[in-house]
Image (cartoon, rainbow, N blue to C red):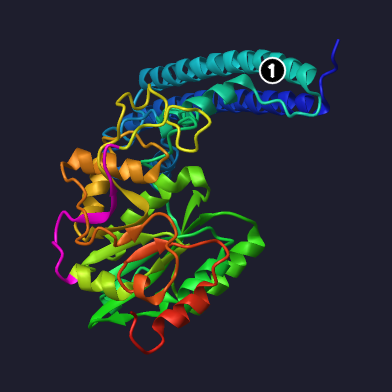
Amino acid sequence: MATRPPADHRRLWTGSCRRHGLICLMIFVVAYLFYSTKTTSKWNSEMEMKNHTNPPDRINKSQTERATFRTRNRNSNTPESNPTLHTNAAGVASVKAAFTSVKAIIASAMSSVKADTASAASGAAAGFSANASSPVVPQTHIASTAHQEAVKTQRPPPAPYVSPGPYLVEYPYEYHFIINEPERCEQEKPFLVLVVPVAPYNKADRDVIRATWGSESSVSGKAVRVFFLLGLQGDAEMQQQLLQESEAHRDLIQSDFVDCYKNLTIKTMVMLEWLDSHCPGASYAMKIDSDMFLNVKNLVNMLIWAPKYNYMTGLVARNAAVLRDPSSKWYLPFDLYPQPQYPRYALGLGYILSSDLPKKLIQASRHVKPVYIEDVFLGLCMQQLGIPPTDPPGWDYFHVFPLRYNRCSFSRIIATTTEERTDRVWLWKDFKKPGPYC
């Protein structure tokens, strides 16, 4: 048999002593009321006899003192409209009422003592046998606390986490910016904003872009600004390095999603949210990969004559087949997208949006399955809006395969991917040197 912990003995003894003390106090009050009423009644009888012998105008000092004494010792059962006890019957009735009330209280207290003692004993035995080191709480207290918490909160339990699976991402979702530049667009009013999704650890690409096409802040009289979009990756040391980099360049935007290839759709939607919230005044925005060469002058000159609304352009894919091979990097199962072909979409290497589209795409995304292929997902959102992407004016403006460098060919394009081993800083310096391109 388990031995009751000493703390439980003390708790039971303390609760019992409190209630027995209350009972003793109640008995004392009843005795006092009975004695006071009896004395007052006897005093009333004596004074009535004296009043028969003493004329009413002979009220002496003792009667005044008695009236004062009665006023000071008026009990709670005496009506306020009748401040003195006039007869023995009134006093006896008052005592009976008080005694009945106290008797009920005593009975309730005794019942409470028995109930608390039994529940505390059973709770202590159960609690001690389960875990001797855990404090035992009376069951009445547990029930009361649980009821109060239920009344206070009235909230359903949180739903368990359900993974979207390997081919969908967690969007819509309320992501938050950790590093931000919320006022630069408002202060500097760019015509074109270039957003470069890049991994947090990839500072090398960021530095290359800052030293090359990202350094062009004014082209053909139009302001251009570059921002790098990051998610979460790495440890506290890397995060500290990002904060220092942000302080130095003021061009980092970081959100609290996990930065990985599968989450490119989340990264793209966070970009659109940022453009809608912090850069709605820019006429155009371009998403461009970090390994690209960009001819900013040709891009700006094209956009000066481009439509102002519902405009999306880049390297537009048509009738692209849905890949059903599970080993493919862009595999999508039939149950998620049963059609054999995707709608028209702009390839993710680089596409341009008019300033009204970020908000519209965010709204449309609520009605589209969030597939992990980010450029396809935007194409599905454009289809939801009924706005097809537009081909650029020149058929060779965008190149998905690296274009062999020479100044003449690069002077005619807008963007191309580059070889991994390309010295892009040297290429940019050569491209920008004075003299004719061709």
User: Which amino acid lies under the numbered mark 1 shown in the image of this protein?
Assistant: Gly
Q: How many marks?
A: 1
Residue at (35% x, 46% y) in the render: 375
Residue 90 placement: quadrant: top left
Extreme residue in the top direction: 1
| Observer-nearest of 391 and 170 | 391
Instruction: Check residue 307 for magenta coloring.
Output: yes
Kindly state the secondary structure of the residue where label 1 is placed: helix
Residue 433 placement: quadrant: bottom left
| Observer-nearest of 334 and 340 | 340
Q: Is residue 148 above or below residue 356?
A: above
Instruction: Check residue 76 for magenta coloring.
Output: no
Residue 351 x/y as whole percent: 31, 57
Q: Residues within 10 Å of mark 1 (few under 14, many from 20)?
A: some
Residue 5 x/y as whole percent: 82, 24
Q: Is residue 231 above or below residue 414?
A: above
Q: Which residue is mark 1?
A: 123
- Does residue 323 appear in this view? yes
Extreme residue in the bottom direction: 434
Residue 355 x/y as whole percent: 21, 61
Q: Which residues are magenta?
A: 304-319
Q: In which quadrant of the rendered image does the N terminus lie?
A: top right
Residue 352 x/y as whole percent: 27, 59
Decide if residue 227 is on the left or right side of residue 241.
Answer: left
